[in-house]
Image: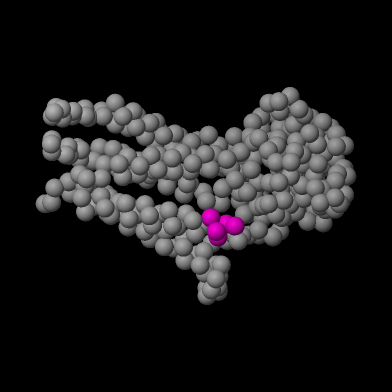
Amino acid sequence: MNEPATRQPPVFAGRIGITLLCIYLLAVTLRIGGCYAPDLARRDEMPGVGPAVGDEFPTFKLRDVSGIDVSREDLGGAEAVIVVVPSLDWSPPTKARLLDLADEVAARRTARVAVVMSAAQATPRALAFVRDRRLPFYFLIDDAGLIERLGLGAPAPDGTPAALPATFVLDANGRVRLRDVRKNARSWLAPPLLLDGTATGVP
Amino acid sequence: MPRHFAYRLLAAVTAFFFLLFGLVFICGFLDRALFQILARPLFDTDPWGYYILGVAGSVLVTWAACLIAVVRAPTMNPGVATATTVGLVLGAILRLLAWYSGEYRQAGDQLRLESAVFLVLALGFVWLRPPRVEPPAA
């Protein structure tokens, strides 16, 4: 007994669906570059917070993830960069910011860099990032209230203490030569401008 | 001009690059795991990374072989185009997520560029694929 041959209909719905998905992803591909990026101008979105340009940076003594104690004096004698970060766990832009900075510092080998994070943000994933990347920075865990003293405290999305993203460049005497404080981590001052001291923007 | 020229060209170009990268990955694995001929390794990773590299290279070579079958008989292997589309879209999504994670900052915008190329190729495989040829009724 011969059955009539069944002809499959063309799968237009599948084609259109995958086309829409591809177009959406292409749009994301083009737009995603704008979700975080280095900035070519300095910003100071919270001018009343932290030491001003020309002020002495507060003294501190914090423990590095390797277990050694690091103080502001240990960073002295040369240009130093203090980078306050919200998190190295849940903040992709912060990771990108540090990797950008690491490239620039490795190329110049002039500045000492200390990354300060809240003790609550020293999570296993953050410590794994630090351990795996072997960045040429001190990674200081703030369990002494430095972030609060600077006025940079901010809650993380899960409510734990974190920090606003901020960068301070200190001269050899520990005075602030440049500061860049932002309300969110989606942009950061481009490292070449940071280390050259040629950043423009808010004085 | 041969039939389905654009589709065959697309499959051929894709197969060429998959074959090229597949062989490079396999060479990278063989060089580090067995022979250590090159003064500097092709890829900066650890022994498990080289193993994964070898596996990925094998998959790419296999994929290229499937695409070569498409070049030879474009109407007889519609499933290869579907699988290639799925693979390319998945690859594009993974690259977007990798870019967003911040962990691959040193790659710059390369991941985004690769993602865009994959998506354009996927669209090509969707719309250039010739209609299925039904087997003759018994």
Q: Which residue: 49% across, 41% down?
A: B94
Stretch of the chain drawn in magenta = B48-52
Given residues A37 and B101, the one toward you in this image is B101
**How far across and how far down the image is residue A146, in percent?**
84, 36
Please say which color scheme the image uses: one colour
Quadrant of the rendering where the C terminus of chain A is positioned: top right
| Residue at (85, 37) in percent of width and height | A143
Q: Is residue A46 left or right of residue A201?
A: right
Whether residue A89 is visible, yes or no, is yes
Depicted A151 relative to depicted B82: above or below: above
The residue positioned 29% from the left and 26% from the top of the image is: A13
> Does the magenta stretch mainly form a helix, a strand or a loop?
helix
Q: In this orientation, does residue A52 appear? A: no
Residue at left 55%, top 60%? B50
Reply yes or no: does residue A166 show up in magenta: no
Q: Left or right? Give the position of B31 relative to A44.
A: left
Expressed as whole percent of the image width and height from the top left, the position of residue A92 reads 61, 38
Where residue A94 sits: x, y (%)? 64, 40
In this view, the residue in front, B19 or B110, is B19
> On screen, B19 above or below A27?
below
Q: Quadrant of the N terminus of chain A?
A: top left
Q: Residue furthest front?
A: A1
Query: What is the count of numbered marks?
Result: 0
Residue A80 in percent (x, y) is at: 76, 51
State the residue lying farthest toward the top.
Answer: A159
